Amino acid sequence: MRHKDDMAAILGVAQVPMRTRIPEMTYPDLLATVAARAVEDAGLARDEIDGLILAQAPTATLGVDEPQYWGIAGLPGAHAFLGRVHVAAASGLSAVRLAASYVASGRAKHVLVVAADLADEGDSLRGALAQMHDPFTSGQAPINAITAAALQSTHYMATHGVSERIFAAPIVKNRLNGVGNPYAQLRKPVTAEEVLDSPVLSWPIKRLESSPRTSGAAAVVIGKANSKRSVRIEGFGNFAGAKSIGAQMVPGWTSYLDGSDVTQAAQRAYSAAGISNPQQELDFAEVYTSFSIFELLSIEGLGLCAKGEAARRIDAGEFHRGSRLPVNATGGATCGNPISAGALVRIADATAQLRGEAGDCQVEIRHGRAVVTAIGGLFQTHEVGVLAI
């Protein structure tokens, strides 16, 4: 394991309250707002930022392409633009991994990572996202995030002999957690019956199991630790699978169906961080949950419980905010999911927890370690990061 002084750290974070629409702010306004707040939170002057990374994917949601050419002018570090990261909902965590490498290698002292999404800029978010997928097969078998997650869900049900009711458990937990989060878009609790009775999107996925259409923004400043509020980045793990859904379903291979892809990324992150028993060495997890199945597979893939046990344990009170190992104590993507900025929101929430600054969402910090995850593309890419104080 590396010496603490050699590690990159999170110095500052910022986000804005997530909403369906933010008509009073343009895309550059959102970037500028969170950038300024993150730099201030880091205790730095804007001219101390010597690197800027934009996390933005997909641009179809903005209705205008190539935001790196028109959205970053005037931002701290814009004179030293290091590039744009486009890995769909994993963009933020991938960008932080890149920023940490610049800092750890000495190529930059302070790198600002920014991301924003305005979900109402395009006429149809679903139509915009559909443009990213294979035009030759989508007519016969529509492949998008919802239908792909539905395949995961039915596979989980068949493998573990459970009913669709189990997918309500993470949603009920997360929506209750979101009540105390001032940045959450959805801040009203729901019951399991309400989740199950909501309209079907792609069976067995219901509307209340899916994250909402969200506008929002977040920013993170990466550098060497400069105060007691700095949060070290102890390790990253990444897994990149095949582009084709079919190629991800080959029996015996690492598959998006059973969460073994998450496990691969987690093992690499844990190895880098020196973690051998995540159930005993972590305080909490912030995992990407735009659909219920993602949380179940993430909890199991991260080694926080055995395969097929996550939903039952949630029903029993485990992984709740007041439990020994909370998952998504702020509500997570269930309560708001600006696609490009979602992973940075997970990092901002985890940083606030480790600092003891999460307010009504605060969990008990005993070991000073947390894990965050993000999923990109059509579930081909998984990013896992271990943060510590």
Image (cartoon, rainbow, N blue to C red):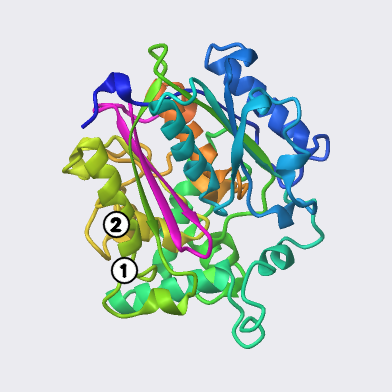
Residue nearer the viewer, 145 or 290: 145
Report the residue at 54% width, 38% height from top: 345
- Mark 2 to mark 1 CA distance (whole Å): 8 Å
Percent coordinates x, y for residue 31 in the rendering: 70, 32
Check disc 1: other Cα within 10 Å, few if <14, some if 14-19, many if 20+: some
Residues at discs 2 and 1 in contact (Cβ within 8 Å): yes
| Left or right of residue 83: residue 98 | left
Magenta-highlighted residues: 362-389
**Position above or below: 92 against 4:** below
Q: Is residue 364 magenta?
A: yes
Report the residue at 61% width, 45% height from top: 186
Disc 2 marks which residue?
Answer: 264
| Left or right of residue 385: residue 126 | right
Q: Is residue 183 visible?
A: no
Check disc 2: other Cα within 10 Å, few if <14, some if 14-19, many if 20+: many
**Position above or below: 373 against 51:** below
Which label sits on residue 254? 1
| Left or right of residue 262: residue 48 | right
Percent coordinates x, y for residue 210 in the rendering: 56, 60
- The image quadrant where one finds the C terminus is top left
First in sequence: mark 2 vs mark 1: 1
Report the residue at 18% width, 39% height from top: 280
